[in-house]
Image (spheres, rainbow, N blue to C red):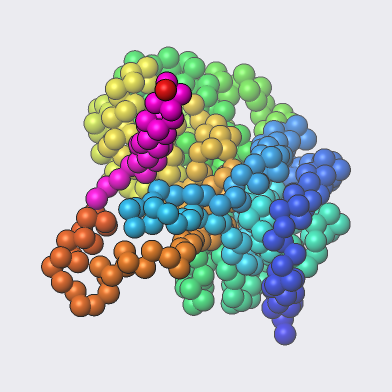
Amino acid sequence: MSREQLVVQRARKSFHTGKTKPLEYRVHQLKSLLRFISDRRRDIADAVKRDLGKSEHGTELFETLGLEGEIKLAIEKLSEWAAPRPVEKNLLTITDEVYVQPEPLGVVLIIGAWNYPWAVTLQPLVGAIAAGNAAVIKPSEVSSHSAKVMEELLPQYLDKDLYPVVTGGVSETQELLKQRFDHIFYTGSSVVGKLVMEAAARHLTPVTLELGGKSPCYIDKNCDITVACRRITWGKFVNCGQTCIAPDYVLCEPSVQSRVVEEINKSIKEFYTDNPKTFEDYGRIINQRHFKRVMSLMEGSTVAVGGDSDESQCYIGPTVLKDVTGESKVMKEEIFGPLLPIITVSGVEEAIQFINEREKPLVVYVFSNDNKLIKRVIAETSSGALLANDCLVHFTVSALPFGGVGNSGMGCYHGRHSFDQLSHLRSCLIKQLKMEGINSMRYPPHTAKKLGWARFFLLKHVNVCRLRRMALLAMFTGLAAFVVPHFIR
Ligand code: NAD
């Protein structure tokens, strides 16, 4: 029996003891996860520094702060999320108990990516624990230092059987994917996403795929270009451009291209100094393979800003490419690095057409003062999310479902969405063995009269609240009619 098989078997056995059913148990595990983050802040920051060259404060801001928020929210709201959810009834079920009961799915496999190795691996875990599941955690082997710390330290805080960490590369992930899970939550590229879905199909296992893609960013010529470019510079170059929701490329009119270049250049200097290479808040490309891949994407494009690199350090400076076309090499795949191409279009109409000719992205960004233009982009494009006049921050709103559509993924998470995504929403209908007479309309022989009644009961839309109010009113009126004359006498 392989290690992976054993781990899954142990998790399932432990899940079947029913240990995760009580909410107190889940809250206890969530609190332990919170304690892990605060106790091991330094270990986490050191690992991320070695993986991605990120500063300690940068790691807290972009990796663990959101995670802490998600855990605290789950602890606070768990009893509300897990409670039965009454639903609207029809005339036939008016006296019955009708509700949705969230229940745990079983054993979840969480496959994380390397770019935010803690956030994208442990945020789904928050949902898995809150929903009462066991979860096998597979951090990305590419961010090896983070994976090692996770493997060594997390079991000191969480139940080892229910939430095991499995490290390893592609072959270990493939071995895990052969096992039967009740849900697979994958974060990574679309290419591997397809393999994950194929493996899941063999067991009819549902999947959440948090993938990537090329998120466009349209700048309207009438907006405040200085502020727009500041926010775009931040969204693009944080984590060296290795952010799934980073603006991948800019679309703007030719008349503002040089202004956009100039403003982004100014912001790069403001955020990362004249020498980003020695500045502690500018990171590194994860490895040589990705360094070479990103460098090769520049081929055939005109560098307007940056373009400097150092292979020995996996360093690529913040770079802006101008006069790029849809046919340029940099437009053929998700960049996932610090290159920002600018493509000129004649206006919003052409920008929308450009976006719609490509795969549905994770986010569409639009910068404009014109609310009508923003609403037009919302109405005429499709993407996982739309963010106007800022970058990335929709990620911080737990109430917004975070996820892709089409090639950028399926399913979503964050806040209650994580809980729902990793729960089975079970329909419950509890009737009494009374009022049998009303059922005769569905029993044979089927007659026109019975059908008429069935039509009335099933198709008549009733507002149950209004009906209840009317019944109460009738009761009070009846009571009043009886009691008032009694007192007047
Ligand atoms: P990666 O190489 O770390 O792969 C992700 C996971 O897939 C790893 O755990 C790895 O073990 C596994 N894997 C890799 N090859 C496999 C194979 N052949 N079979 C089975 N498993 C395999 O990460 P990546 O794919 O380079 O990640 C970058 C991508 O992830 C980008 O496209 C980015 O946009 C996307 N991403 C999306 C989100 C999101 O929330 N939507 C977040 C982060 C990253």
Residue 487 locus on image (x, y percent) = 46, 24
Instruction: Name the residue rendered at 65%, 25% in the picture.
Output: 272
Q: Is residue 166 above or below residue 251?
A: below
Find the residue positioned furthest to the front: 489
**Of the pair 202 and 225, the residue shown nearer to us:** 202
Q: Is residue 436 above or below residue 401?
A: below
Q: Quadrant of residue 104?
A: bottom right
Q: Which residues are magenta?
A: 460-488
**Magenta stretch: includes residue 468:** yes
Residue 408 locus on image (x, y percent) = 44, 51
**Of the pair 360 and 294, the residue shown nearer to us:** 360
Find the residue positioned furthest to the bottom: 1
**Magenta stretch: includes residue 330:** no
Residue 80 locus on image (x, y percent) = 61, 44
Q: Is residue 462 left or right of residue 135?
A: left
Instruction: Name the residue rendered at 42%, 22% in the picture.
Output: 489
**Of the pair 190 and 128, the residue shown nearer to us:** 128
Q: Is residue 3 left or right of residue 398?
A: right
Q: Is residue 187 left or right of residue 98?
A: right
Res. 291 in view: no
